[in-house]
């Protein structure tokens, strides 16, 4: 870990923290919620050893990257704008992109907006989400899953206070250890449980106390408002992406997910992933990999297997 280099880069009007190692073709790793560049620690070391320049930023609002206060500064255009400026700072024409969770969402947007910058894309956990012109996202999720669905609850300003009350360490542990199939819901009464009376959450084998300490330190310093603003701009991003309605992703893609993933087990996702629509929307989709017995954080839970799948894919180009 001490061989990973860190720097601050000026991109798109903010200062972004970037971790990297290695020389060669750039593999850009984009993290999800509630994570940091650190989630890719095993991938950075592995791909640097394989002859790549592995780069993982803290995205806008996270870790040591700036966190603008205004909710409206977290749209897909803002986040993709950060990523485009970061890619330009590398001095290369194209990069490989690997995204997990929200990082995968940003990767899909990047492929839609700037396919010229992406040699190939590996999406972990989140399949492509074609824009539905008839339904705003939050309205649709509330209709299908109810108001307690986590993305709906994340719209509410009091959720930060709920996380603080539950405790940052307890919250991170609960998210990392969860293997409950979707759709995840957060009831308004005691949304995360009671850390004083509930059975203590045990850390998974792939996430140590040292890892937890790093996460807690960063999130207690930065807070959760920036990361939650990604969810709070879902409807605004929907409005801004009207020109891309019906657009297809014309970049080579590999999709990977664990069969116990909270997103994959949400109603409707398997039908889309394994039906004809996914391939229709992403015509250069080359492969779908379902890892058995693996949950949401597959790149941390099974790093060797995931790294091999990623490398076998990008090594073609």
Image (cartoon, helix red, strand yellow):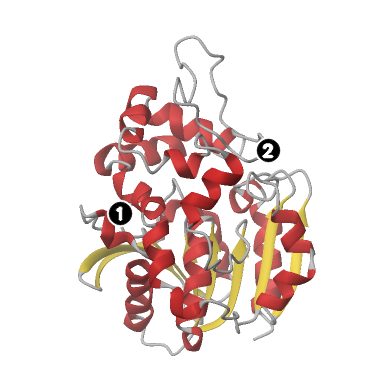
Please tell me which residue is depicted at 37% across the width and 25% down the height of the picture.
167
Label 1 SS:
loop
**Which residue is disc 1 drawn over?**
61
Label 2 SS:
loop
Instruction: Locate residue 49, reporting x and y percent.
Output: 56, 69
Q: Earlier in the sequence, mark 1 or mark 2?
A: 1
**Which residue is disc 2 drawn over?**
181
User: How many tags in the picture?
Assistant: 2
Q: What is the crowding at mark 1: few (fewer than 14 residues within 10 Å), some, or many (at least 20)?
A: many
Tell which of 202 and 248 is nearer to you.
Answer: 248
Classify residue 283 as left or right of residue 146. Answer: right
Please tell me which residue is depicted at 36% across the width and 71% down the height of the picture.
77
Q: Are marks 1 and 2 in contact (CB under 8 Å)?
A: no
Quarter of the figure with residue 126: bottom right
The residue sitting at the front extreme is: 134
Tell which of 124 and 281 is nearer to you.
Answer: 281
Label 1 – label 2 distance at C-alpha: 28 Å
């Amino acid at each position: 870990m001490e061989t990973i280099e860190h720097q601050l880069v000026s991109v798109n009007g903010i200062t972004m923290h970037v971790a990297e190692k290695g020389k060669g073709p750039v593999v850009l790793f984009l993290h999800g919620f509630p994570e940091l560049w650190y989630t890719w620690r095993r991938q950075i070391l592995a791909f640097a050893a394989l002859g790549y320049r592995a780069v993982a930023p803290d995205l806008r609002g996270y870790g040591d990257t700036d966190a603008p206060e205004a909710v409206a500064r977290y749209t897909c255009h803002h986040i993709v704008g950060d990523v485009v400026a970061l890619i330009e700072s590398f001095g290369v024409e194209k990069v490989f992109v690997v995204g997990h969770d929200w990082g995968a969402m940003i990767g899909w947007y990047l492929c839609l907006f700037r396919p010229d910058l992406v040699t190939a894309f590996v999406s972990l956990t989140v399949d492509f989400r074609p824009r539905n012109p008839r339904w705003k996202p939050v309205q649709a999720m509330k209709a299908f899953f109810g108001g307690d669905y986590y993305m709906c609850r994340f719209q509410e300003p009091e959720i930060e206070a709920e996380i603080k009350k539950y405790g940052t360490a307890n919250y991170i542990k609960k998210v990392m250890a969860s293997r409950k199939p979707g759709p995840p819901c957060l009831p308004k009464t005691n949304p995360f449980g009671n850390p004083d009376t509930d059975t203590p959450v045990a850390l998974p084998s792939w996430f140590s106390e040292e890892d937890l300490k790093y996460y807690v330190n960063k999130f207690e310093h930065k807070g959760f408002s920036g990361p939650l603003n990604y969810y709070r701009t879902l409807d605004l991003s929907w409005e801004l992406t009207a020109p891309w309605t019906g657009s297809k992703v014309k970049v080579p893609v590999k999709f990977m997910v664990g069969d116990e993933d909270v997103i994959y087990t949400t109603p409707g996702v398997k039908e889309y992933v394994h039906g004809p629509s996914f391939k229709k929307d992403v015509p250069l989709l080359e492969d779908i990999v379902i890892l058995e017995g693996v949950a949401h954080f597959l790149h941390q839970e099974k790093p060797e297997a995931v790294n091999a799948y990623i490398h076998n894919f990008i090594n073609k180009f």
